[in-house]
Structures are given as C-alpha cells and as structure tokens.
Image: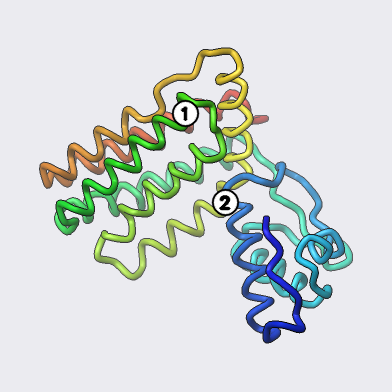
Amino acid sequence: MKPVGSPRSSPRAAVQDGVYKQVRQALMWGEFEPGKLITLQSLADTFGTSLMPVREALRRLAAETGLEVARGGSARVPAISRQRLDDLCQTRKALEGLAAECAAARMSGEEIEACRDIAREHERLGRNGEVYAMLRHNQAFHFAIYEKAGSDVLPPLIEMLWLRFGPYMRLLSDLVRAQMAEGSLPDYSTQHFALVDALSRRDGPAARAAMVADIEATQALLRGLCPA
C-alpha cells in the first residue's frame, strides 16, 4: 500500500477517504491474512497519518463487513471457513452471473475486445509467475464486465462481496504462488475466454454460465484449503 500523504497537505476528509480506499483495495486483493489483527498504529505509520483517519477507515470497513471490530478500536480480518466460502460463492454466482448476462446485451465491440485484452494479459502474467499482477487483472476483467451491466445496483453489491471474499483471495494467491513454483499452474483463463466469446455473440445465458463456472472453479480450489 502506498501512503496517502500527510494530513497537513490534504483536507481531513480527503485523507480519511484515501486511507479507506487503499485499505479496502488491499483487503479485496488479499493482502491481509485471514484472522490478522490490524492495529490503528500500524496503519497510521504506513500512511503517515494520525490515528483519526485510520479509525474512521476501519469503522467504515467494519460497517461493510470487510473487517470485524476488535479491542481498542482496531480491527480483525474475518476468519475463513468452508461454510462462509460456500455462502459467499452462492451469492456471487447469483449476482455476478446476472451482471454478465445483462452486460452481454449492452457492451460495445470495443469494450468486449478490451476485456479480451485483459484476459490475454491475465494469462500471460500467469505464465510469467507474476501472481499478484495476475490476480489484479482478474479483478479488472470481472469489473470491466459488471460496470457495463446497465445497473446502478449490481456493481456496488458485487464489490462488497469481493471485499468479504478478500481473505479467500489471500488463500488463492498463496496457492497460485505454490503452483507456479512447482511448474503445475492450471489454465485459469479458460472461463475468461469463454465469457468473452459469449459476450461477442451477445449470448446472455452463455455469459452467465461462463461467469458461474469461473466462480465455481475458484470455489473448488479453495474448499480444500478452508477449515470446516
């Protein structure tokens, strides 16, 4: 995470919002271990701010259920379990599948080709062993589609689900890194290309099916790593 700067050079609200957005994105990318305690002082030191903007950022993230409130105003990354994973994935499949189906009727040819380019870069990064960049392109690919669903409701709801999915992204990044080290990395881009092809055909049901298959593939990988 990059520091947002000193509160002396930015209005207080801007500093609070900057801390919130960067911690939120770090959670979505799986930069924090499941169950990890996040202290006010550690984040204040990271961002070079006082405790106040950090406290406000953690409060907002706890309200979004991305964090759990801990002692002393600090917060904890939620623990993981198969039951929580299955619950999240069930909801993700419903909402993200719907978003993909809606986007199939609305995306321009240029927007679809941009998604194909992201999928190709995601594939290339995987072959090169750049795990974090690969996972960030995965997020970029998904949200390039969700944002074209023609809905003001779906993208923020999906984003909140991804925030809650953050601890599992940490598991996924550790798994992918191990697979890369062993030279046994599966093709994680298969469903991405199937989804782009469905979008190109304006086939909403096929786009939904490819999105659901992508989520289910990740779910299957993670279930064996989660405690019951």
Left/right placement of residue 74 relative to residue 182 reads: right
Answer few, some or many: residues within 10 Å of disc 1's Cα (few below 14, many 20 plus, some between 14 and 19): many
Quadrant (top left, top right, bottom left, bottom right) of the N terminus: bottom right
Q: State which mark lies toward you, 1 or 2.
A: 1
Q: Is residue 43 above or below residue 56?
A: above
- Please, what secondary structure does the residue beneath circle 1 have? helix
Q: Is residue 214 above or below residue 20?
A: above
- How far from the left and from the top, in percent, is residue 135? 50, 40
* Residue annotated with mark 2: 28
**Which one is nearer the viewer's eye here, 174 or 126?**
126
Tell me the residue that label 1 is attached to: 126
Query: The residue under label 1 is which amino acid type?
Result: Gly
Q: Is the image coloured rainbow, by chain, by secondary structure, or in one colour? A: rainbow
What residue is shown at x 69% (from left), y 49% (from top)? 78
Q: Nearer the viewer, residue 59 or 135?
A: 135
User: Residue 106, image x and y in percent?
Assistant: 17, 59
Residue 88 location (% of width, % of height): 50, 46
Q: Which of the 4 image quadrants contains residue 83?
A: top right
